Amino acid sequence: MKKERSYRDSVHFIGRFWILGALAMLIAVPVAICVYYSAWPPFGGVLKGFLSVAPIFWTVGVIEVFTYVPMLGTGGSYLGFVTGNLSNLKVPCALNAMDRANVKACSDEGEVISTIAIATSSLVTTVIIAAGVLLLAQIEPFLESPVMQPAFDNILPALFGALGVVFVSKNWKIAMAPLVFMIVLFLLVPSLASSVGILVPVGALIAIGVARILYKKNIL
Amino acid sequence: MEIGKGKNGMEFNSNSGFMYVVVTIVIVFVLLQSIVFLAKAWKRGKELGMDKQVLRKAVGSSAVFTIAPAVAILLGVIALSKALGFPLPWLRLSVIGSLTYETTAAAAAANAVGSSLSQQIKDPTIFSTIAWVMTLGIIPGLVLVPVLGKRIESGVSKIQTKDSKWGEVFLNGLFLGMISAFLGVVFARVREGLTGWIPVFVMLASALLMLICGLIRKLAKAKWIEEYALPISLLGGMALSIPITTLVQSLVG
């Protein structure tokens, strides 16, 4: 138990170093562009652009921290939040890997598997994008052909359909209420689709609330 | 000031060697982080006495699973490259960013300075405005994880030590909350008529493939399929979306 604490602490330590390093480098990029091209932007322009994205994306950013940190574990969080594409790639990838390895999130083994899954996924993503940019001339006609469009338009339904079978079938008693709620909600207010990130904690609260009731009644 | 040049007259090109160098440095930094964390987790797994085979399988299935979403991200890079060149979208989509976020942020920023993403950005000031807005929009995660990560974790572990069974149920609730939100979105276009059902059909096709994988595993005792069931269903669902779309469109006429 003591050893566990020291392992997580060491991940927190190096994680902070890497995540703050990444933050500094990311900010250095626009600074470098401005300095090199002597092109400091008008403050008003940046503010106006920022105000049009911040209300949604800062909210989603805060929500993601609270919902994904418990799922991804310590190492997975420090790496996942730096490498991005959480809900469309890293979180499903980590959940699937933990499920396949038959380990629980937040356990010692879950921590290991989640970190390995996210690190592998980040490396593969970087390699694919690099290869794609280099080989663009060859693959662009294929990727952008109208025939292929439906496949890329439907990546999220295909991803969550498969993932849903795994997790819903295992916990269908907990899953029913949030699932019905979300389907009805999106049928009634389709425009919410663009802010699905904000609805993740709503679904989680419903699921956890229902789970608590069922658990207390010993139905789970 | 002449458009296309900075104040010092330096020619601006969003695909310049300078841009590639800057972006490569950051991407290499993030690659290093992935390698360091992978090595650390691997070592920890061995310490815990986990089977090497299990760790290897986690690498294999994660790598295969990543291919299709990564190609979708590549498409995002290509789409944004028409206005912003390759380096900036490349950076923003392989580090921190996400497909939905980056396009929205770039479009909002361009709009704020009276430009748009419909053509190549040649003015370095407009370009730097877009770069700043894209960067500022993703700061919360990077600041909050180091600040709150430990506290959130100790909150969860408190729940788990108090009642380990409830701790497990609690985490399952969290997963299902996320999954149900993303499954709900699939129904958002249903009211547009039959074409709005396409995502629902694709979701069902992919779910069916997942069930078939489970069946094959049971009936043929093909344990290997377990590792690749998710990538198979994902790619299969995406592939089936092509005939599904064609069929629906021919029905709608």
Image: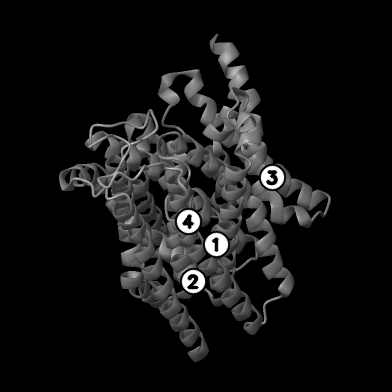
Residue B21 circle label: 4
Chain letter, disc 3 residue: B
Mark 4 to mark 2 CA distance (whole Å): 28 Å
Mark 2 to mark 3 CA distance (whole Å): 27 Å
Image point (42%, 80%), residue name: A13
Chain letter, disc 4 residue: B
Q: Are marks 2 and 1 in contact (CB under 8 Å)?
A: yes
| Residue at the top extreme, as displayed | B253
Q: Secondary structure at mark 3?
A: helix
Q: Position of residue B160 (x, y in %)?
A: 44, 75
Give the residue type at disc 2: Gly
Answer few, some or many: residues within 10 Å of disc 4's Cα (few below 14, many 20 plus, some between 14 and 19): few
Q: Secondary structure at mark 4?
A: helix
Left or right position of A133 against B189: right
Task: Specify whether residue A185 is in view.
Answer: yes
Q: Nearer the viewer, residue A207 or B120?
A: B120
Residue B180 circle label: none
Give the residue type at disc 1: Ile
Discs 2 and 3 share one subunit: no
> Which residue is identified by label 1?
A118
Residue A101 against residue B73 in the figure, above or below: below
Give the residue type at disc 3: Ile
Image point (25%, 48%), residue name: A54
Q: Counting residues from the N terminus, which is met first, the one under dot 2 or under dot 1?
A: 2
Q: Secondary structure at mark 1?
A: helix
Residue B232 circle label: 3
